[in-house]
Image: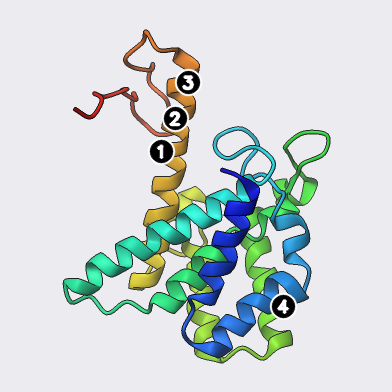
Amino acid sequence: MPYDFLESSFRNLIASIKYQPLQDFVNAAFFKHGIWEKFHVWPAAISLHHAYTNGLLEHSVSVAEGAIGISKHYSEFGIPVNLDLVIAGALLHDIGKTEAYSIFPSPSMTVAGNVIEHISMGYYMFMHCAELEKLEDDITMAIAHIILSHHGKREYSSPVVPATPEAMIVNTADDLDFKLSYWKLQMDSIGGGAEMTDYLSLVERKLWRGIKPR
């Protein structure tokens, strides 16, 4: 995705947060407290998905927009979803990767990323910003829960599992974005003549190219 498009999309997502104190907080976290300095150029992973310059920005925008679509769908079916929390949580969920990964000379894991992990680091960074900006306690807890639970399971390094509609939605959008990106990476690697990968332990399945739209 072109960088200008991603940055514009990111800023528009923040601007779409209707509760002004939360919109102001997200702006402050990224642009006042320095998260954006690395965030907009950092990779989202070392090799598995979005492992390139601007990858973290692309992944976060994709997760947020996917989560918005899921939220609107379930809101129509009577599930009360706080869309502002979904957007804020989706944009903030991977901020710890700015400290857990390095981009120079190529995407790699930092020492802190290995021994602390990006979810814990992201939680600390978020809580520090929340304290500085005096974010309301209930909103702080709701977004902290999204960050801590966004991998969905304890065995996937989440300290807690998603317990709110907003956390479930961000977890689902994050997991889907990873899996689809990984699917594309695998399809590119096996070439156009092959239809299916070998068994991939990371996603616990073989991946199929499928059929083209008619």
Quadrant containing the N terminus is: top right
The residue depicted at 54 percent of the width and 50 percent of the height is 59
Q: Are marks 2 and 3 in contact (CB under 8 Å)?
A: yes
Q: Are marks 4 and 1 in contact (CB under 8 Å)?
A: no
- Find the distance from the CA under tag 2 to the CA under tag 4: 36 Å
Give residue 91's position: percent from left, percent from top: 55, 64
Asked if residue 93 shows in the view, the reply is: no
What element does badge 2 sit on?
helix
Give above or below for 28 relative to 170: below
Residue type at numbered disc 2: Lys
**Residue type of the residue flagged with mark 3:** Asp
Contact check, label 1 and label 3, Cβ < 8 Å? no
Q: Which residue is mark 3?
A: 188
Dot label at residue 212 = none
SS label for mark 3: helix
Can the viewer see residue 75 in this picture? yes
User: Given the current orientation, which residue lies at the most extreme right position?
Assistant: 105
Distance of label 4 from label 1 (alpha carbons)? 33 Å
Q: Quadrant of residue 22?
A: bottom right
Q: Earlier in the sequence, mark 4 or mark 1?
A: 4
User: Residue 180 has which mark?
Assistant: 1
**Neighbour tally class for label 3: few under 14, some 14-19, many 20 plus, Cα within 10 Å:** few
Distance of mark 1 from mark 3, alpha carbons? Answer: 12 Å
Q: Of the residues tagged 4 and 1, which is closer to the observer?
A: 1
